Image: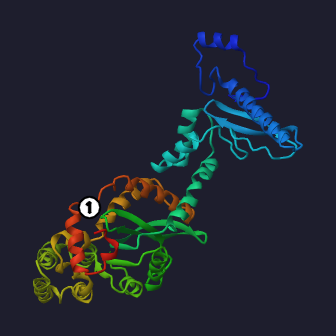
Amino acid sequence: MNINENTEFNFNDAVQDIMNGKNISGKDGVLAPLVKQLVEAALEAELDSHITDDVFSGNKNRKNGKSSKTMKSSDGSFILDTPRDRAGSFEPQLIKKNQTHLTDDIEQKVLSMYALGLSYIDISKHIEDMYKIELSTGTISNITDKIIEKVKAWQDRPLEPIYTFIWLDAIHYKIKDGGKYDTKAVYTVLGMDKEGKKDVLGLYIGESEGANFWLGVLTKLQNRGVKDILIASVDGLNGFPEAIKSIFPKTEVQLCIVHQIRNSLKYVASADQKPFMKDLKLVYQATSKDIAEDELLKLDDKWGKKYPIVLKSWNNKWENLSHYFKYPYQIRKIMYTTNIIESVHKQFRKLTKTKGAFPNKDSLLKLLYMGIKNAKEKWTQPVHNWSQTISQLAIFFEGRLDEYLEL
């Protein structure tokens, strides 16, 4: 039902319609024609008050016709005639100049459904069912585009001066670039502050591989206020350890053991994987670095000739793979893998599972931003037994936490 300027509200007819079983509210409800009249009457009252104030202040002003625009509400669409003043100083408060919805309720419903991963078509159907008005996919896109400004502000927000841990891992999506769809890596940087609470520090779409990309990411973190990072756990990406040392030279870089194992098994024959893993566990589950190195030598002696690429990788990366051995269990289990990011990526996958590809970066980033908001709802408490962990870190990284802890 479109409520136009010729629609009049007749009380007696409305009562009869209600008695006949017609809905009171909604698109075809009894009160639908009243919406336009009430809103326009309120705007006229606003203008009268504005002109009275102007005249009382010694300014010349008077009414100057009306302008029309289409409004949408839960009771349907209608043409709203907004009164104008000669001076052009009238700013209506009930319905803002650029407002096209009677309330923000519809937009909030759109954003809520978008945050659940619904497609534009599904959102449009739900809005029509709830409000009895049609929203095009273009309109829904315009509503969700409002998230982009929030994403930009979130990406540039100030950060804490120190993070005890950061983790970095990637998830891949197809994004249109230069007329064709390419698979891009979206890197999630997750941090844990001195209170033991997690926060996603940023999302970065990888345009290139190597140290230059990571140098840019870390420089952005530094420019946003990060002065120190104790331990960085990363997934073995080329150039990252070197890049982080160039910006944060005191940071200890731990390569993700889980990623290293997965990558190793890609080069081990299926028939050998079970016995190989039995021997490999003696390396990464060792109680000390010395024992782990002895087991790595045994692993090399037994499997090195058959799988030289795998053993060469473990030996070449050993320095950054083995840092966690010097810490107690409480710290080890936090730093040895980047799997802690999986809760974030799980939200990403939930929201994007129906999307085959994305037309541009912004369309992807605004959806991932909603995923981060969903994931953060569960991050209200610090990690378990954080008081013991931060005490241990203060000993291992003597002096670096002192100015940031309230003791």
In this rendering, does residue 333 appear at all?
A: no
- Residue type at mark 1 is Val
Q: Quadrant of the N terminus?
A: top right
In this rendering, does residue 127 appear at all?
A: yes
On the picture, is 247 further left or further right than 383? right
Residue at position x 29%, y 66% in the image? 339
Rendering coords of residue 94 (x, y %)? 68, 38
| Residue occupied by mark 1 | 383
Position of 284 relative to 349 (above/below): below
Position of 388 relative to 229 (above/below): above
Rendering coords of residue 237 (x, y %)? 37, 80
Rendering coords of residue 305 (x, y %)? 17, 90
Rendering coords of residue 407 (x, y %)? 28, 69
| In front of the other: 165 or 131 | 165
Mark 1 nearby-residue class (10 Å; few <14, some 14–19, many ≥20): some
| In front of the other: 45 or 173 | 45
Place residue 194 in its image quadrant.
bottom left
